[in-house]
Amino acid sequence: MQMISEKKLGKILRDLAKDNLVEYINKMNEKTKARGAVGFLTNDPDHWAGYNVYTAAQLLDYLEKEYQHNLRKDERRQ
């Protein structure tokens, strides 16, 4: 049985997470388009890595935090 180095395993796991993130975003964008919206999320994993987002769960957490942040901004403007 051949052993995989820790570095190679880490790359494999990061690539799988990116694939899952891209797949999840693509599905979200399909649903958004079906509702007639014109704005979509980028599915570029490098973009999301800049926000420390590598998985669909992290994306949902990020989007929720942004939503809450924007609500607070709106409240301050009123």
Image (tube, grey):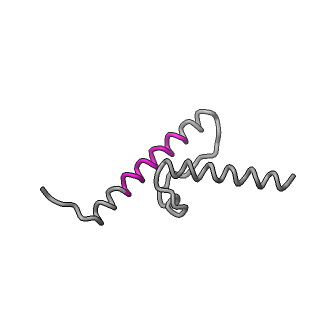
Q: Position of residue 6 (x, y in %)?
A: 28, 64
Q: Residue furthest top?
A: 34
Task: Give the residue drawn at x 59%, y 37%.
Answer: 33
Q: Residue furthest right?
A: 78
- In the image, taking residue 55 as reference, residue 40 lies left or right, namely right
Q: Nearer the viewer, residue 2 or 18?
A: 2
Q: Is residue 15 above or below residue 7?
A: above
Q: Is residue 36 above or below residue 1?
A: above
- In the image, taking residue 77 as reference, residue 7 lies left or right, namely left
- In the image, taking residue 30 as reference, residue 10 lies left or right, namely left
Q: Position of residue 54 (x, y in %)?
A: 46, 56
Task: Give the residue drawn at x 51%, y 61%.
Answer: 52
Task: Give the residue drawn at x 51%, y 52%.
Answer: 58
23 within the magenta span: yes
47 within the magenta span: no
The total number of labels drawn is: 0
- In the image, taking residue 66 as reference, residue 14 lies left or right, namely left
Q: Position of residue 1 (x, y in %)?
A: 12, 56
Q: What range of the chain is rendered magenta?
A: 14-28
Q: Magenta region, mostly helix, strand or loop?
A: helix
Q: Nearer the viewer, residue 78 or 22?
A: 78
Q: Position of residue 78 (x, y in %)?
A: 87, 52
Residue 11's image quarter?
Answer: bottom left
